[in-house]
Image (spheres, helix red, strand yellow):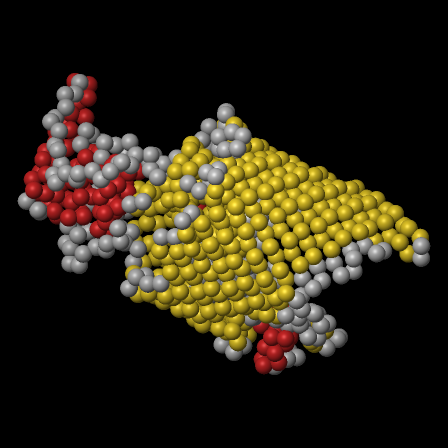
């Protein structure tokens, strides 16, 4: 059975009984060789704002701190403990990317197989981080590039190696022919000879041919294919004698595009290359709570106590990618999903799919198409969907994109259908999208994006206008600036909350169907009802990170936000229902700070202390979070944390919460990891009439297998 068939069979077995999608933040990790090092791009499924990372430039463990940026439309809560592994390469230490504390202080934990040198920057699309890693084999200075290959003399072989001897003779002849063609500047003839050599079984001239077929293509003006050949050399021969030379040639190509009118070599180098990689994680979660409450009424206190097991389930997640690569095409089939087996009485099991798609693109990057369940990637698309997205052209000149499908992240009623188009030209993008539900226009918008990305400076701007509501849906400006080791970041955001949608009319309604509301409301009345049930949020935030003392970094953020209230709407005992007035929250102010240190007690450790103070017209809160990470010999990693939280409201009710937690991980070789965590959450709420104390003991244990 072919790899394609095997992968689809696996996907079919995993997705039997598909439910709604889980919110998994990590999309992919890709590699690119550049002059500054190997750039690993960590792709996320929704917009984020980079805050800081630590350590600044070297270590075995590194953490990237960020905040979710509200999307144009719907946002999903993200899950913890999602893991992606770097693509294989012998040029740098392999690493894993793990999501942590997504609901409190979101961060990505990058764990290298050994100590590495790196730098981090936000990606230009606001949905990625660029992790630049210094390769293990990089020249200390520029090396001289040979003009022609050195053709080694035929090596002596044993009589038993008759096949190798025959292959070496053919390889020697073809290598000599290719050298002569290169000397005569007959690059197409050199490509043909080298391709014939590479079709032979591996021999003593294969490595040299792989290097020089890239040189021949580069000299022929086939820059995109030259990059492919150089990439392949670095992957096949990470310890090869010409690694430094190939990396320098690859870096020199930069952003060059293939020349016009270049005659392509007719001989194919080799058959299509197949690979399969991914991982499977299985984890058991358990928790038990004890709740004590006291209610005072007419000077009489009623006390109650209850104990229960509130969590007992096994969660298995799968991440499988099959990749098909030729000289011209890069194709992938991706499946990511989860199975939840709940052991509590009355709880059903769930099979959920995050991604299930086929993707094909040209190696030159001019075209790309993706079919199946996927995450929306800009263009005004409102989240995960089942459908088709495609694009053609060069983004630096002009690229045209189209998308159509059905959203899958809604659990109530029908799922909206949409189609849209967008164009990209350099840093600018523009889009238009139309979305319907039950035959009614749900969202109809036009928008534009602008990106600036250079070295340690970046800016991103977004505007989204809904023509169905004739109103501005979202405006956003965010950026980062690096100055002498200091990093500044900012965010300005104005948007409708929730995003403009006809479905907002269902808030407070006695039905969950737009079709039912259509029976009693005209299209304009339905829009007006949705509009009056939509608030407006304004947000401004600035932050700074400063390293000091060689082992420390301090950071802080100031955040101001305001959400308007809602007036009363609707009529009681009607399908649209009655929604009482909701007052605005006033200006909410939050000040937060973080102090991070590394190498304080042992090599590679990380210590972090962060805190925040927040206030609004009704609620004041404060929090403190302590975290420690240690890597021990023998494959052990241990984390410990303590979180303190306090909140008071206008009714003098006070809520406090204390949560200590420990987590351990043990690597069994390179492909299997065992990990566990456990903690206690003690919370207390003191109100004027009701007081509660809750003690919750929780833990989980599991294993991850990479392949």
Q: Is residue 707 left or right of residue 620?
A: left
Q: Is residue 549 left or right of residue 586?
A: left
What residue is at 33 percent from the left and 63 percent from the top? 426
Can I make out residue 338 in this image? no
Residue closer to the observer: 389 or 108: 108
Q: Is residue 460 left or right of residue 643?
A: left
* Residue positioned most to the front: 549
Q: Quadrant of residue 178?
A: top left
Residue closer to the observer: 36 or 3: 36
What residue is at 36 percent from the left and 52 percent from the top? 455
* Quadrant of image for the C terminus: top left
Q: Is residue 146 above or below residue 482?
A: above
Q: Quadrant of residue 570?
A: bottom right
Residue closer to the observer: 649 or 334: 649
* Residue positioned most to the left: 184
Residue 690: x, y in percent? 83, 53
What residue is at 23 percent from the left and 31 percent from the top? 241
What residue is at 67 percent from the left and 72 percent from the top? 566
């Amino acid at each position: 059975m072919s790899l394609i068939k095997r992968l689809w069979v696996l996907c079919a077995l995993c997705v039997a009984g598909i439910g709604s999608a889980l919110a998994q933040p990590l999309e992919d990790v890709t590699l690119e060789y550049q002059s500054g090092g190997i750039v690993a791009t960590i792709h996320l499924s929704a917009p984020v704002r980079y805050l800081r990372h630590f350590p600044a430039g070297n270590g075995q463990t590194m953490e990237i701190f960020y905040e979710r940026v509200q999307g144009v439309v719907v946002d999903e809560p993200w899950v913890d403990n999602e893991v992606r592994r770097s693509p294989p390469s012998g040029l740098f230490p392999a690493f894993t990317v793990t999501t942590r504390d997504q609901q409190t202080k979101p961060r990505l934990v990058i764990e290298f197989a050994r100590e590495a040198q790196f730098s981090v920057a936000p990606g230009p699309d606001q949905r990625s981080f660029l992790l630049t890693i210094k390769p293990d084999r990089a020249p200390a200075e520029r090396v001289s590039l040979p003009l022609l290959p050195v053709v080694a003399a035929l090596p002596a072989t044993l009589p038993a190696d008759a096949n190798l001897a025959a292959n070496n003779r053919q390889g020697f002849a073809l290598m000599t022919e290719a050298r002569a063609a290169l000397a005569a500047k007959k690059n197409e003839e050199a490509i043909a000879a080298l391709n014939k050599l590479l079709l032979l079984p591996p021999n003593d001239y294969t490595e040299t041919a792989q290097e020089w077929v890239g040189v021949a293509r580069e000299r022929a003006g086939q820059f995109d294919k030259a990059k492919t050949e150089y990439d392949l050399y670095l992957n096949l021969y990470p310890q090869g004698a010409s690694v430094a030379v190939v990396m320098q040639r690859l870096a020199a190509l930069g952003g060059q595009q293939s020349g016009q009118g270049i005659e392509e070599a007719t001989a194919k180098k080799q058959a299509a290359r197949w690979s399969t990689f991914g991982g499977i994680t299985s984890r058991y979660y358990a928790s038990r709570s004890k709740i004590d409450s006291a209610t005072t009424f007419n000077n009489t206190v009623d006390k109650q106590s209850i104990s229960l097991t509130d969590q007992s389930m096994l969660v298995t997640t799968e991440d499988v990618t099959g990749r098909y690569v030729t000289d011209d095409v890069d194709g992938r089939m991706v499946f990511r999903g989860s199975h939840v087996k709940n052991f509590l009485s009355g709880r059903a099991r769930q099979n959920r799919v995050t991604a299930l798609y086929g993707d094909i693109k040209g190696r030159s990057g001019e075209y790309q198409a993706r079919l199946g369940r996927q995450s929306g990637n800009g263009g005004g698309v409102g989240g995960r969907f089942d459908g088709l997205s495609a694009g053609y052209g060069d983004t630096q000149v002009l690229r045209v994109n189209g998308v159509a499908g059905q959203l899958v992240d809604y659990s109530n009623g029908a799922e909206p259908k949409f189609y849209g188009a967008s164009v990209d030209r350099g840093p600018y993008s523009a889009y238009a999208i139309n979305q319907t539900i039950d035959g009614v226009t749900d969202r109809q918008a036009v928008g534009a994006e602008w990106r600036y990305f250079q070295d340690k400076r970046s800016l991103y701007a977004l505007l989204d206008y809904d023509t169905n509501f004739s109103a501005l849906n979202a405006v956003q400006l965010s950026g980062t600036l690096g100055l002498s080791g200091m990093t500044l970041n900012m965010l300005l955001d104005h948007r409708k909350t929730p995003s403009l949608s006809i479905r907002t009319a269902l808030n407070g309604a006695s039905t969950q169907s737009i079709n039912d509301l259509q029976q009693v409301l005209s299209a304009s009345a339905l829009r007006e009802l949705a509009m009056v049930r939509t608030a407006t949020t304004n947000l401004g935030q600035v932050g700074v990170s400063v390293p000091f003392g060689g082992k420390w970094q301090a950071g802080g953020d100031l955040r101001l936000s305001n959400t308007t209230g809602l007036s009363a709407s609707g009529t009681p005992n009607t399908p649209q229902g009655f929604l009482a007035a909701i007052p605005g929250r006033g200006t909410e102010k939050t000040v937060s700070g973080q102090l991070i240190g590394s190498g304080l007690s042992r090599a590679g450790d990380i210590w972090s202390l962060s805190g925040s103070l927040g206030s609004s017209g009704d609620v004041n809160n404060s929090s403190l979070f302590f975290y420690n990470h240690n890597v021990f010999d023998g494959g052990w990693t241990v984390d410990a944390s303590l979180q303190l939280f306090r909140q008071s409201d206008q009714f003098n009710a006070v809520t406090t919460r204390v949560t200590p937690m420990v987590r351990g991980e043990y690597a069994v070789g390179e492909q299997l990891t065992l990990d566990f965590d456990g903690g206690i959450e003690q919370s207390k709420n003191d109100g004027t009439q009701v007081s509660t104390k809750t003690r919750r003991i929780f833990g989980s244990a599991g294993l991850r297998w990479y392949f």
